[in-house]
């Protein structure tokens, strides 16, 4: 005898007919992402002016409200040309840019040529308070306090700080917490020898020069998968056309009468 | 007419405690303090009263009762200065302010009630303005001046069964018409009246304890026995006699002194006294409806070896005038932390250099450009106060071909120097419009050019030869001001690929053998 269609025995639980679509975790909350994806949906970050770099950064640009650490072997690899589009955009919104302890004296004409507005740039030169070897090793007195005040106040558009290798133990954590009250980007520029030291910054990049007007960017730490290969960006040129051609010609010639560095990462870059 | 009386029962003690250094003020409630006038105790604080010290005791008796008693001379000058500060704070709310005696300030507020939105709102604002001064205030209201002063001094807690709380004006000692005032004052003791205090013994002997008893007696007999002052005072209190008053005028300049109890040897000890003076300055500024633009703290030192030291002056100038106590205190604290005193300080004096009258810019709930700019100015002021004026800088481009002179750092004064674009931005825009080579100057310049070693006429940086790519650019200038520069500039590449700016001296220099120098790096 056939059972009546649709009748259910009283002991069975009611199950839904079709399961509801569970949302993927990266859409639930911006702090969640899968290991193979870049964290944060696109459009939250600030445009850096370089499309290949934006594709590699979580959020499609520089993060706001968090520290970004840039590690350089020495000053003058092209870091200002990398950051200039972002700083110019911040100043175009009537916000101020503050620099803390730059490694050398900035040249006003060069900064104007990069697109920065000198009226909206404040430079804190606290390094002159220290003498001798301490000047390069230790942070100047009160510069960490000043950095924290500027981040917490929320009236500064962007912050660039050059910090030495030796910092107090909690300094980076405190700065990261202070940066959460900050609406714009905050960059810490430090020595490349610190790449193996832990840091509280959510995004860490290592910058190196890959030839004239060319910058190699290696992402050390980000909310996302590790970077497959370093990125090479073409910076706004300093050299004229003939000078650049000469540089590339010289680089292509194997070392004959010219002492070159043993590491040759710049070799393949120039032979493009 | 509505009269409000502010009575300050502990004025002399509080004025004295303002002269103590900061670390002692936190223990004020625990440490017994007594003020002495004419060899007898004139005022005691709570801790001293708990030990048994009373007014009119001799000094030795008081010390015997409390071993750690802090004794100091009562100073009417100091008390008058403190009372003046309270009167100035009251002048921000009504122009009719007068002093009743050494401890009471009278305000006539009938004209101010409508502006400030009623007596309750005015009372709240008045007490909030008094709060930074740190005095205990007893407030009472009455239709006559003397009546309000009597109520404020008496501060009855219970009248005919109703209990009054201290700050509740509408239910507290408050009378709106003379009949109600008479009813309230009926139970007031006789020693509240000045003349009543002198004749207190005699009045007590006669069994007259309250003002009601006084009013029952025939007036002629009372006048004959105790003089007419008692009756006059009573009539003024009940509104039967006219009581014209001369209003207090606000001084045109602010100059207040505070003598410290103990010598101050570090600037921290000066901080507390300076804070008190700052509060008085702001009370005066608010009575003038103005904001403070600059003030100076003078620290008078003690004589050292019979030589009078000139006072140390600390001037604080604000980029934007402000009437906020917290901001001024922070600036003063940061500046004092960086100073060292030449000699121990005995006395502090505060004067105001620059006062800005006019409407206060409107506060904004949501951040706008104006409030952001103001916030940036405050931040720069705080940074300058802590780090020094020579460490917070702005860059300026100078039209000079020598690179070390082409860029100058000036102290950052306000949020924005000027609205017009400066020469450098104009030139940059023009050169980009014409397609000129944009970045022919390095962003990082070394303040002193670094001499480079040379091998086979090639400059070397850190042991590696530099590859000259572009140049020479000849800069030859500066013969007129003693710093001539005759140089050929080249853009060179290091072996890591970074670009540097080096120059070759055209004329051989006698002192240094090197010919190649590093001037900057391209960033």
Image: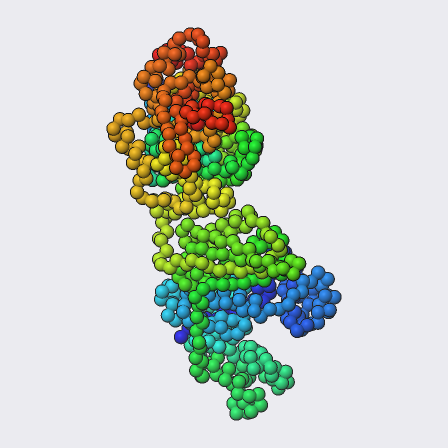
* Residue that appears at 42% across and 14% down: A266
- Residue B34: x and y, percent? 65, 66
Seen from the viewer's position, the closer of residues A6 and B430 is B430
Q: How many marks?
A: 0
- Residue B295: x and y, percent? 47, 56
On screen, residue B22 above or below A244: below
- Residue B242: x and y, percent? 43, 82
Residue furthest left in the image: B434
* Residue that appears at 56% across and 35% down: A131
On screen, residue B292 above or below A9: below
- Residue A52: x and y, percent? 35, 21
On screen, residue B308 above or below B5: above
Q: Quadrant of the C terminus of chain A?
A: top left
Q: Is residue A66 visible?
A: no
Residue furthest right in the image: B64
* Residue that appears at 67% across and 72% down: B40
Q: How is the image coloured?
A: rainbow
Q: Is residue B221 visible?
A: yes
Q: Which image quadrant is residue A107 in?
A: top left
Q: Quadrant of the N terminus of chain A?
A: top left
* Residue that appears at 44% across and 51% down: B318
Viewed as shown, does residue B103 lie left or right of B415? right
Viewed as shown, does residue B37 lie left or right of A15? right
Seen from the viewer's position, the closer of residues A59 and B333 is B333
């Amino acid at each position: 005898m056939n059972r009546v269609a649709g009748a259910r025995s009283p002991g069975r639980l009611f199950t839904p007919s079709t399961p509801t679509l569970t949302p993927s975790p990266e859409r639930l909350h911006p702090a969640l992402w899968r290991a193979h994806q870049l964290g944060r949906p696109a459009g939250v970050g600030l445009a850096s002016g370089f499309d290949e770099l934006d594709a590699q950064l979580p959020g499609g640009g520089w993060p706001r409200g968090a520290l970004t650490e840039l590690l350089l072997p020495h000053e003058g690899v092209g870091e200002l040309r990398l950051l200039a589009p972002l700083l110019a955009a911040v100043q175009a919104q009537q916000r101020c840019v503050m620099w803390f302890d730059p490694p050398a004296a900035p040249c006003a004409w060069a900064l104007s040529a990069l697109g920065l507005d000198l009226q909206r740039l404040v430079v804190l030169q606290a390094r002159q308070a220290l003498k001798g070897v301490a000047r390069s090793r230790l942070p100047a007195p009160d510069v960490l306090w000043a950095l924290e005040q500027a981040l917490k106040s929320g009236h500064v558009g962007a912050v660039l700080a050059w910090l030495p290798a030796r910092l107090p133990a909690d300094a980076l954590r405190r700065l990261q917490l202070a940066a959460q009250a900050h609406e714009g980007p905050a960059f810490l520029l430090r020595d490349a020898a610190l790449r193996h030291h832990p840091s509280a910054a959510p995004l860490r990049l290592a910058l190196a020069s890959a030839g004239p007007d060319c910058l190699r960017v290696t992402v050390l730490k980000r909310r996302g998968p590790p970077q497959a290969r370093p990125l090479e960006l073409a910076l706004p040129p300093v050299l004229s056309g003939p000078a650049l051609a000469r540089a590339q010609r010289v680089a292509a010639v194997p070392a004959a009468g010219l002492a070159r560095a043993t590491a040759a990462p710049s070799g393949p870059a120039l032979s493009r | 007419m509505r009269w409000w009386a502010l009575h300050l029962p502990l004025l002399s003690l509080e004025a004295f405690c303002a002269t103590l250094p900061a670390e002692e003020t936190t223990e004020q409630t625990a440490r017994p303090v007594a003020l002495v006038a004419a060899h007898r105790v004139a005022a005691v604080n709570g801790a001293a009263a708990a030990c048994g010290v009373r007014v009119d005791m001799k000094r030795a008796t008081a010390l015997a009762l409390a071993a750690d008693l802090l004794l100091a001379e009562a100073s009417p000058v100091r008390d008058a200065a403190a009372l003046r500060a309270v009167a100035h704070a009251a002048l921000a709310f009504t122009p009719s302010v007068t002093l009743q005696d050494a401890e009471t300030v009278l305000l006539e507020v009938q004209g101010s009630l409508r502006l400030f939105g009623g007596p309750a709102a005015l009372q709240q604002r008045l007490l909030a303005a008094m709060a930074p001064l740190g005095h205990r205030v007893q407030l009472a209201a009455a239709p006559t001046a003397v009546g309000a002063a009597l109520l404020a001094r008496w501060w009855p807690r219970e009248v005919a069964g109703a209990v009054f709380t201290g700050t509740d004006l509408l239910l507290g000692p408050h009378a709106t018409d003379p009949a109600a005032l008479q009813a309230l004052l009926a139970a007031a003791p006789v020693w509240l009246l000045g003349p009543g205090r002198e004749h207190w013994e005699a009045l007590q002997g006669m069994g007259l304890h309250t003002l009601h008893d006084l009013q029952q007696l025939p007036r002629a007999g009372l006048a004959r026995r105790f003089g007419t002052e008692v009756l006059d005072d009573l009539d003024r209190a009940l509104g039967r006699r006219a009581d014209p008053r001369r209003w207090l005028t606000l001084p045109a300049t602010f100059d207040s002194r505070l003598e410290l109890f103990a010598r101050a040897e570090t600037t921290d000890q000066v901080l507390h006294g300076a804070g008190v003076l700052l509060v008085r300055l702001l009370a005066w500024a608010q009575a003038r409806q103005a904001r403070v633009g600059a003030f100076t703290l003078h620290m008078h030192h003690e004589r050292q070896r019979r030589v009078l030291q000139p006072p140390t002056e600390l001037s604080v100038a604000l980029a934007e005038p402000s009437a906020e106590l917290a901001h001024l205190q922070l600036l003063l604290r940061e500046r004092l932390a960086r100073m060292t005193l030449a000699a121990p300080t005995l006395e502090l004096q505060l004067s105001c250099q620059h006062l800005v009258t006019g409407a206060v810019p409107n506060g904004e709930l949501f951040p706008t450009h104006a409030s952001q700019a103001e916030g940036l100015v405050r931040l720069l002021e705080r940074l300058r106060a802590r780090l020094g004026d020579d460490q917070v800088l702005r860059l300026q481009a100078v039209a000079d071909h020598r690179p070390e002179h082409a860029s100058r750092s000036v102290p950052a004064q306000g949020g924005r120097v000027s609205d017009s674009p400066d020469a450098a931005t104009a030139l940059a825009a023009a050169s980009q419009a014409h397609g000129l080579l944009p970045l022919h100057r390095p962003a990082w310049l070394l303040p002193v050019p670094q001499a480079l070693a040379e091998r086979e006429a090639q400059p070397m940086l850190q042991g590696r030869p530099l590859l000259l790519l572009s140049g020479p650019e000849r800069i030859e200038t500066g013969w007129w001001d003693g710093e001539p520069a005759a140089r050929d500039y080249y853009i060179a590449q290091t072996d890591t690929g970074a670009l540097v700016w080096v120059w070759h001296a055209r004329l051989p220099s006698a002192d240094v053998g090197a010919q190649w120098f590093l001037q900057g790096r391209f960033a």
